[in-house]
Amino acid sequence: MLPLLLASSSPYRRELLERLHLPFSWASPDIDERRLDDEPATTLVRRLARQKAEALAASHPDHLIIGSDQVAVLGEQILGKPHTFERACEQLLAASGQQVTFLTGLALLNSTTGQCQVDCVPFTVNLRELDRESVERYVAAEQPLDCAGSFKAEGLGVSLFQSTHGCDATSLIGLPLIRLVDMLLKEGVQIP
């Protein structure tokens, strides 16, 4: 089996990948993650996932490289990582009582053959009606400043949900393991 490389510095993605009990290393790719003019969200996450994997191919020959990228979509608006307390509060208040769709792009690149499998896995969250005080308490407690949509589904963020819909809950955290296993099996990887 070719060694696995996760093209991400995200601790959330590393924790998810550890669930498969496969040895892997990780490295942070250096790519421009800006959205292209009028680029649909699905196209954006697929492109960035692939670019992250491809960015490490030259320095990691003979690897299976996993790239992933995620955005949250509220209506027609793409919600990125908030980076600040106030921006996180604004995102959550705008999403109050609304449906937010998380789109997670996934790529698996065989750096030996150049074969790259790419997909986008959606997951939808319906948020409860939220008030400023509860949002501020949540953001102060969990600090979701590096999370698309401003919440951590694997933590206290679940308290903001009214319901969820999707085929792979791990996609909500940033690495759709069910789809990744499909891709790995196509590459001949034996899952323990």
Image (cartoon, rainbow, N blue to C red):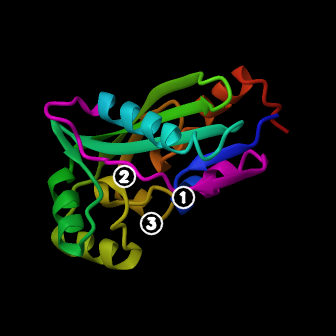
State the separation of the CA atoms marked 3 and 2. Answer: 10 Å
The quadrant where residue 78 appears: top left
Q: Is residue 170 magenta?
A: no
Q: Where 54 falls versus 113 (above or below)? A: below
Residue at label 1?
A: 12
Magenta stretch, residue numbers: 14-41
Q: Closest to the observer: 107 or 149? A: 107
Q: Specify the principal SS of the magenta part.
A: loop
Q: Is residue 169 visible?
A: no
Q: Find residue 161 and name its label.
A: 2
Of pointers 3 and 2, the one earlier in the residue sequence: 3
Decide: few, some or many residues near mark 3? Use Cα within 10 Å; few <14, some 14-19, many ≥20. some
Decide: few, some or many residues near mark 1? Use Cα within 10 Å; few <14, some 14-19, many ≥20. some
Q: Residue at x 51, y 30 (%)?
A: 167
Q: From the top left corner, tell me how far across and down residue 181 is, in percent.
A: 67, 31
The quadrant where residue 66 appears: top right
Q: Horizontal placement of 158 versus 65: left or right? A: left
Secondary structure of residue under mark 3: helix
